[in-house]
Image: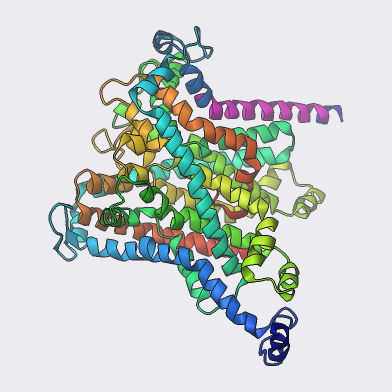
Amino acid sequence: MSLLNRENSRVTTTTPRLSGKIHISLKKQETITGWLFILPILIGFLVFVAGSVIYSLVISLTKWDLLTPPVFIGIQNYIRVFKDESFWQCMYNTVYFVIGLVPSVLILSMLTAIAINQKVNKLTSFFKVSFYIPNITSTIAVSMIWLWILNPTNGLINTLLHLIGITNTPMWLQSVVWAKPALIIMRIWQMCGYYMIMFLAGLQTIPETLYEAAEVDGARKWQKYRYITVPMLSNTTFFVTIMLIIEAFNIFEAIFVMTEGRPAGSTNTLLYYIYYNGFQYYRMGYASALAWILFAILFVLTLIQFRLRRKKEQQ
Amino acid sequence: MEVNFLKIKVGSIIFYSVMTVLSITMIYPFIWGVTASFKTTAQLYNGNPFNLIPNPITTYNYERVVELLPFGRFVLNSLFLSTFVPVLQIILASMAAYSFARLNFKGKNIIFLMLLGTMMIPGHVTLIPNFIIMRILHWIDKYEALIVPSLVSGGNIFNIFFLRQYFLSIPKDLEAAAIIDGCSRFRVFLNIILPNAKPALATVAILSFNRKWNEFLWPMIVMNTYEKMPIQVGLQYLKGSVNTNWGIVLAGSTIAILPTIIIFLVFQKYFIRTVVNTGLGGQ
């Protein structure tokens, strides 16, 4: 019977797909299955993402300590953000992190990727793996180990500095001057393996014929890097730059474990400040307004990155 | 010719020595930390950083970790969460991915775009409202808070995209043949798509395990009782506010790091392939 039905309505199929073998009565089944399959995700999305985002916007217009009912105060939280010295200090610290992190990670990961890409053997895959390990391990645990590494009296780094004859070693995390560089060193160590893999992927897309042509023209090795490799990696480079800037805004766990924003707010970041306002001071409205400002900044950055990703995919 | 050969050899030596030094820099902190966790306090504070071998080897730090905090519970909680949550995530993500990859229905594209947009929203915007939603649902300090929101977190949305991409690469003919034979869409999904997508499912499972194991901020905010905390949250309590015993901290950190390193060493190609293909990796 069902076979008969299928035969009949095949004639009425308006847009035959899969060379006309799919049947219109299946169309309904497809719709039902389709919706059923996305329903759980959709419901969760509507509550914990879409609903939450709208809720956050509402909260950001209130003064709310969770104990007493929220008071609507309009955009006062947002006005307050721009007058808040701590906010500007967070922004300054983030810019510092961007300047410290982006070029060093970029150069280190690109150079190591180019180096590794030249030889393929067991040793180079060992290099790849060992570079990547800091990235997959928990930042919390790694930060604990780094607290010990950066320890001014018998930490690894200062002991090494003593060995090469530097006696006036920095206090690292206890010092206003050195706390940010210390965190930057730790983040470079943690992240560059990840970006090295991205550059390796980028290197694989450069056609071999370009190098062969250059060789015919008598190009030297460094000329090949200068005029072929680096320009051909420009897409990846830009992509990585944006990701690194976003990363600089998102430093949280290392701050949480290692400095708590100290000394004197010199390592405070926007994300840590949001956490601090929300869950230490219970300023839900103010923390939400801060979160929205962080979101606005990251949104612009991510938009650029998505554009670029699409461009990359089309190639 | 000989000069050229020499040049290559010198170049190789420089390359391998520089890379070896860098590689050691990358893994030395782990080796240093792990070996130090087996040292006595005296050796820990007085020894030089190149003296890696604990002498005598002591498990005192590990015994103290278990004494100070319910560390066994932390590990069990994390193991439970990082296996159970990925399973749920994969079930829901693969269903949605199949729907987006293979089924045609009205509204599909809009929903897909909406989810795509979600990936652009950093978790921090939803941190506070989701915490309040947890309070409304009375899920504070309950495992529900660590399970349910994860199913639609950025991580799982990433899983949907990743799986969708893979499902698109499975030949359509396989599916069409089954449907002509009267197979329902659900059975196609279960018996054809999923078995054919094993490598992608494995990748997603491993990355999700890692992500959940390392999760920190959200569980720290919603969980209050020691006995219910995952390991990363529990770990930070080892860091004393006044006097930190580094042997104990390092023992705890070793426990918190070890599973991810083992899994990475066994499955490293999955991690690396994901970065190569999507540029997102375990993030």
Q: Number of labelled discs?
A: 0
* Side of B253 relative to A131 (left or right): left
Q: Residue furthest front?
A: A1
Q: Nearer the viewer, residue A95 or B38?
A: B38
> Is B41 located above or below residue B124 in the figure?
above
Horizontal side of A256 relative to A162 (left or right) equals left
**Residue at image point 80% right, 26% down:** B6
Q: Quadrant of the N terminus of chain B?
A: top right
Colour scheme of the rendered structure:
rainbow
Q: Position of residue A208 (x, y in %)?
A: 76, 52
| Residue ranking furthest to the right | B1
Q: Quadrant of residue A176?
A: top left
Q: Is residue B12 magenta?
A: yes
Residue A105 in magenta stretch: no
Q: Is residue B22 above or below residue B102?
A: above
Residue B158 in picture, x, y percent from top left: 52, 56
Please provide percent x and percent y for residue B254: 47, 26
Residue range highlighted in magenta = B5-29
Looking at the image, which residue is at 47% across and 22% down? B33
Q: Residue at x 45, y 20 (%)?
A: A156
Task: Say which residue appears at 33% left-offset and 23% top-offset.
Answer: B68
Instruction: Classify A225 as above or below A125.
Output: below
Whether residue A73 is visible here, answered yes or no, is: yes
Any part of residue A151 in sight: no
* Front one among B177 and B44: B177
**How far from the left and from the top, in percent, is residue A139?**
44, 37
Looking at the image, residue B223 sits to the left or right of residue A164; the answer is left
Q: Main secondary structure of the magenta part?
A: helix
With respect to residue A198, does B116 lie above or below? below
Q: Nearer the viewer, residue B25 or B75?
A: B75
